[in-house]
Image (spheres, rainbow, N blue to C red):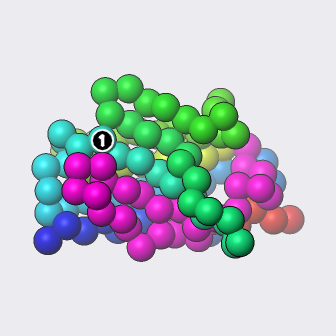
Amino acid sequence: QVQLVESGGGLVQPGGSLRLSCAASGFTFSTSAMTWYRQAPGKGRELVAFIGGIARYADSVKGRFTISRDNVKNTVYLQMNDLRPEDSAVYFCYAVSSRYWGQGTQVTVSS
């Protein structure tokens, strides 16, 4: 059974940092590309970052966010620095090979 469990969200002030984690199980994690998406209220789901052989980022987060993975721990991370109010959203991880979503973790950037 595929499981993706996100954690690390919360409330942070503008300019702050958070690190999201997504722990995966039930599929061959090391060979699957992994992605982070986000969805703000009233908006569609937006691709934030992708990691396969290389990493790719949405223009809105380039230079601020870093995606990484640990194939021993079967976990993908999203380090988010210099957070802005417009980064507030529910963040989801998605396993490309299994086409499975996590349940999401809320990130709120506010003073």
| 55 shown above or below 5 | above
Name the one closer to the observer, 91 or 20.
91
| 6 shown above or below 15 | below
Name the one closer to the observer, 68 or 42.
42
Crowd tier of the residue under label 1, counting other residues whose Cα lies within 10 Å: few below 14, some 14–19, many 20 or above: some
Res 3 quadrant in image: bottom left
Does any portion of residue 16 appear in the rendered image? no
In the displayed image of the protein, which residue is found farthest to the right?
Answer: 111
Left or right placement of residue 53 versus residue 87 in this view = left
Name the one closer to the observer, 39 or 61.
39
| 108 shown above or below 87 | below
Does any portion of residue 32 appear in the rendered image? yes
Residue depicted at 43% across the width and 40% down the height: 50
Q: Amino acid at mark 1?
A: Ala
Chain part drawn in magenta: 82-106
Name the spot of residue 14 as percent of width and height, x first: 80, 54
Q: Which residue is mark 1?
A: 33
Element under disc 1: loop
Residue depicted at 55% across the width and 35% down the height: 57
Left or right placement of residue 108 versus residue 9 in this view = right
Name the spot of residue 74 as percent of width and height, x first: 23, 51
Name the one closer to the observer, 82 or 58.
58
Tell me, yes or no, whether the highlighted magenta stretch contains residue 87: yes
Q: Quadrant of the C terminus?
A: bottom right
Name the spot of residue 84 as percent of width and height, x first: 78, 51
In the displayed image of the protein, which residue is found farthest to the top?
Answer: 54
Residue depicted at 47% across the width and 69% down the height: 104
| 54 shown above or below 40 | above
